[in-house]
Structures are given as C-alpha cells and as structure tokens.
Image (spheres, grey):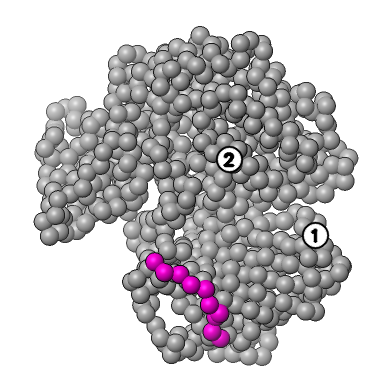
Amino acid sequence: MTGHSLPLPDGAVLLRAAGTALVLDISGGTLPRIVHWGADLGALSDGDLQALKLAAQPQPIGFSVDGPVEVSVLPEQSAGWLGTPGLVGNRGGASFSSAFRVTSSEWETADGGTGERHGSVIVRARDTAAGLELELTVQLTAEGLVRQRATVINRGSTTFTVDTVNLTLPVPPVAVELLDFTGHHLRERSPQRTAFTQGLRVRENRTGRTGFDAAYLLAAGTQGFGNRSGEVWAVHTAWSGNHRTFAERTFHSVSLLGSGELLLSGEVSLEQDERYSTPWQYGAYGRGLDTVSERFHRHLRARAHHPTSPRPVVVNTWEAVYFDQNLDRLKRLADAAAAVGAERFVLDDGWFGSRRDDSRGLGDWYVSDEVWPDGLGPLTDHVTALGMQFGIWVEPEMINEDSELARAHPDWIMATGDRLPRAARNQQVLDLARPEAYAYILQRLHELLTAYPVAYLKWDHNRDLVEAGHQPGGRAGVHAQTMAVYRLLEELRTLHPGVEIESCSSGGGRVDLGILERTDRVWVSDCIDALERQQIQRWTNALIPLELMGTHVGSPVSHTTGRTHPLDFRAGTALFGHFGIEWDLTSAEPAELDRLAEWVALYKELRPLLHSGTAVHADHPDPAYQVHGVVAEDRSDAVYAVVATGTSELCPAGRVRLPGLDPQAVYRLRPQAPGDVPDGIAHHRGLRLPWWTPEGVELPGSVLSEAGIQAPVLYPERLVLLRATRRQAPGGGRPSHYTAG
C-alpha cells in the first residue's frame, strides 16, 4: 500500500474502499459537503465528479435564502440551513452563528493497488468575525467506514462557550425506516424501529456513561431492511459520556444522521487559543445489517492494540460467592474451574477495605486485613499454580460516603457545590478530573498490580452521573470526568501493558468504541439468562466483534430472572463471544462438570474461527427460530446455532438458510457436538431428522445459503449447533484448517 499527502483540488474528491464510496465537495471555500455516501460508484474521472455534483443539485425553490442551501458535514445557518445546527455556542451572547471559510485543505490517501483510494480529508477553516477556527477530519477507512471529527479553536480574546458540536452524514430518500436501541439494566440494547418521517428524531443520553438505553447504532434503511437484505446507513458515536444522536428529514428533501457530545450548561468554555474536539463519529453503509457490522468488526480487528492472544476461558466469582469471600472456599472453586478447563480466575467485589456489602468501602483500595489476613498471595499463588491467570474487580470511579477516603476527602466527591447528589447504590462519584483524586486512584491501582500477578481488571462503573459537578464551585463536569477516565486507563495500560481491562458498567451500560480504545472487552450484561442473552448478545454484536464480548455460562437457575435452562442452552449461548463461567461449580453435579468441560473444549477448538470470522445472521421469517453463526474469512469453515426462543406455529419448523458460505464450494454439513442433541418432542419420540447423522450431508454453499436445510424440531429455549466444512474449494483447492487456540 502506498500513501501520500497533498493539497485538495477545488472541486470534488472521491474516496473508495471495500464497496463504499464517499464523494466530498470541497469547492467554493465553504465547509465540505457530502455528495454521495453509499454503494461504490466505481472509478470516476474529474469530469464525472463534476457532472455528479451538477446532477445532485436541487432546484433553488422554497429555501430560506436565495440560491441553493448547502448542508455541510457541520451544518451552518449562515448557509441557509435552518435544521439542527452543527455548532451551537456564543461569545457573551454574540457570535451565535458561524460562517466558516476554508483556509487550507489536504488529503492523506492510501492506495491498495485495486484502484480504490481511502484515507483522510483535512480541512481548516476560519470565521474571522466570530474569532473561531475549525479543523475538520473526514476519513474513509480501508474497511469502508466513514470517521469524522471536528475541533473548534477560540482565537478571540474573550471566552467562547461551546454548547454543542454536531456532525452529520446525509442519507438518500430511499432510507425510509429507522432502527435504534433502548433498554435497561438486565436488558441492554433492545431494538426498536420507526418510520423515517419528516422532522427530528433525537436520542439524548444524560447518564454520564454510554447508557443502557443509548441509541448505540442509529440506522436508516430501505423498507424492511434486514440482516442480509436492503440498504443500510448507520452512525455510532465513540464516546463514553453524555451524547446526542439524531435523524432529521426536511421537506426540502434533506435527510441526515447526526451526533455529537451532549454538553451540560457551561461545561466547555474556551479561553483564547483553547480548543474543544468532538468524539469520533462513525458511519457505516452496507447491504444488510451484517455488512454494516462487518465493517466495524474489521476496523476493530485492524487496530494495533486489538487482542491477538486466544481469549482465555474466564471464571468469575460474583454469582458463585457474592461478598462471602473465604480462602478455602475460593480455592475449591479455583480447583473446580481448572478441572473444567478454565484459564482465568477473577475475584470479584468484596476483597478490599470494609467492603462486606455494597454500602461501604468504595475508594479504600487496600486488601482487607479482615478477609485476607495474609493478603491475596495465598489465593493468587493457588490460582497461578493451577495454570490460570488471576483477575480482580475494581470500581475506581466511585466512592461510598461510608469509606475512609470520603471521610478524609469529602471535597473529592462530585457535587453541585452546596449539596451532595442523591446516592445511588449507596455510591457517589469520585471526581477524577481533580488532580489529587486522580493521582490517588492511579497510585492505588499501580500498587495493586505491582504487588500481585494480576493479568486482568474487571473495571466496573455502577451509577449514573447525577449532578456531577466539581467542588467547590459546582461547575458541570461530565466531559472532564470522561476525559479523566480515558487518561487513567491509558496511563495504567502504559504502566502495566500486559494487563487486560474489561469495561463493565452495571453490566452493559458502557459499550462504545471510545471505551474500547482503552479496554480489551466489554461485559455484555449482568443478566446471564441464556434466553435474554440471545437478544442482548445479538445486538451487541451489531457493533462489537465476538472476541470483545464477555459471554458467560450462568447457574442452572438464573439469578436475575429465575428461569431454569439446561446446560447445553446456556453454554451454546455463551459460546458466541469471549466464553466464561459465572456459576458456583463446587455445587455442580459430576455429570454437569463433565458436560461443561466438553463445551469448554469446543470453545477452545472454535475460538480461532469465532474470533476472526465474519458474524452472520439469517433473516428467518419464523420469530420462534433464530439462526446465527460465524464464517471463516476464507469461507472454508463455519459454525451456526439454530435457536428456538419459543414455540413455532409450524411443526416441523421448516427449512433454515445458512448465510455467508461460498456459493461455488461444496460443504460437509453436520451436527456439532456437544450441541448435537436436538432436544425436542420429535427427538424423544424417536422421530429422527433424516440428515441428522454424524456424517451429515454434502451440498454446495449456494444450496445451503439459498435453499436451506430442514431444522430439527426443538423445545423452546433450546439450541443446536451446525458445522459446515468446505470439502471442495473453487478450482479444486484444499480447504484450510483451524488449529485449537
């Protein structure tokens, strides 16, 4: 690949990558406008681009100003745009409307040798009257993702207050349907669809973290778009604090997806030469949701710091022992964990200070003499002697009022200035933007990681940021707190580069690409009920690849729903992610432990495929059955789950399609043990599915993907696994093979 940087011509530029095209108009000295974002248009000449610009211009009729109204990636009212503005701010009540003019522009491009050119367009602009400068970066990545970021710089001699900076991406009129997400604790990322009508649909998050009910992805698409069908345009904001996501359609035939940080009143005030940068906004286009997801997954996997070692099987102690920590009990649990093949043992909440319940001790990050009179050494020695890594739970951003830290430094608690916020889970928020509080937490964590062989931090965050201000004045502080958390994670990783960190936030309350720049996986949800997890994991996977998703096997009776599920359903659900166990294994029957060990062995066999392949989801019409899987990048291997979430109106349930396979190759399809027992009424009556044998059936990929195969009849809340292995590659090549990780 070759790369270069050069000045931009005064016209339109074309960026192309992975089936996506982005055409930017940078003519006329105004901010960049996107002429096209969507399907690849092929190689276009300068003349073609000029003709495209001309053909896309609307008739100048009915606008708020004479002539055309240009809607840039940062829309301005000075251009005649009266929709959602890109920059909202003021200088003492004046300079509320910007009119930026470009002072310089360049692009940094890379050529992959296929005629495609991707890279970055960097534009610098100035509004002399307002005393502002702007830096805009618009990128098209090698994976076909659009990334945008803006930086506002105050060049005036007085304070400029920034209220909002929004970036937008246009979508065409064929996008008539919206998909975004809502949810709550124990039911994160629940999808919802609405029509994309005229007006403004806004999703605002003010929780101080990404939030259970965050829009997550906001997608616009053609009517009825699905996993494998329709055109889809989606945006995500890579930010772990307050943010705003919106879809806007006007009667002037302008349709936009936009987002930005949601700043609290007075939160960002720029003195002369100070600057504010927005979070990165990501945009993905695809034919079906799976293509959108694949772009995000490929982008994350291309990062230099993306985990590359096999994702170890985790045993976490929380639902096994809660606060009842005892060395002998935990050693027995570690023995049982090692026996089933676990590779990482994580000690959860309750190991420090006075922390015997959730009402006290947060902030006192010292090993408890009461619970651990000899320190954690006897436990860490036992765990590592069993061949497992040791991990530990922390919640560095929070503080209990009943703690030595709060008694010594009450002014370190975030507050409005004259009162403490109402407690949540007996917690307040520690102001990490305060240098001395930041230094204290960094030192405590550094000493913990130095004293013990900790390979993994489960980093929790268990309350919303309510009235989160800096004492003593009470200035709003969510932005500064979010930036401080980012710095803390980065500095800790620099000091301890071998330690992995999980983002946990009351379960899955902080899942975004901002936190994942500084962590190694996300805890998907505190709900380990396998039925609930089917939906939660599927939609988390819309953005996040499986190897970054914490997916655990819970106990036979779910601690959060009371449902009872068989082990195969629980383990088969957890298989599709970073597999772990959250269950008191010392209470399990020997047969259960043997069966769990089989699932652990399967995960170890499949994790090279699961954590490098393409996630696929069938558009199956029967709501009682779901089909999802992972196909190897070279399409030589695939594993699928057929999941019954309820009872079907059909019996038998009919054929299911297996998406993503090479249509020209022949595959051997067979049941995959231990998920090869079709637990259903037909199976128990001896009415076998004819092809359901250890040998399975051989069929072309085109048949498996388009005609499909008959699925077994399953009881509700059951699943089976299918394995498709290429037997004959195009041109007679041999299939590739995975080795166990």
Element under label 1?
A: strand
Q: Is residue 585 above or below residue 465?
A: above
237 horizontally vs 673: left or right: right
Split into 4 quadrants, where in the image is the C terminus? top left
Q: Residue 256 placed where, x, y %?
A: 56, 70
Residue lying at 34% horizontally and 71% vertically, measured from the top left: 113
Residue drawn at 83 percent across, 31 percent down: 410
Locate the N terminus by quadrant: bottom left
Q: Position of residue 336 (x, y in %)?
A: 40, 16
What amino acid is at disc 1? Ser
Residue 13: give x, y in percent of width and height: 49, 80
To which residue does mark 2 refer?
493
Please provide the residue range marked out in magenta. Answer: 1-10
Q: Earlier in the sequence, mark 2 or mark 1?
A: 1
- In percent of the image, x 83 and y 71: which residue is there? 156
> CA–CA distance between discs 2 and 1?
30 Å
Residue at which label 1 appears = 269
Q: Nearer the viewer, residue 456 or 717?
A: 456
Decide if residue 92 is in sight here.
Answer: yes
Indicate whether residue 508 is drawn in magenta: no
Front of the two marks 2 and 1: 2
Q: Is residue 425 left or right of residue 547?
A: right
- Magenta: main secondary structure: strand
Determine crowd level at label 2: few under 14, some 14-19, many 20+ residues with C-alpha closer than 10 A: some
Measured as percent of width and height from the top left, residue 592 is found at 33, 19
Residue 7 magenta-highlighted: yes
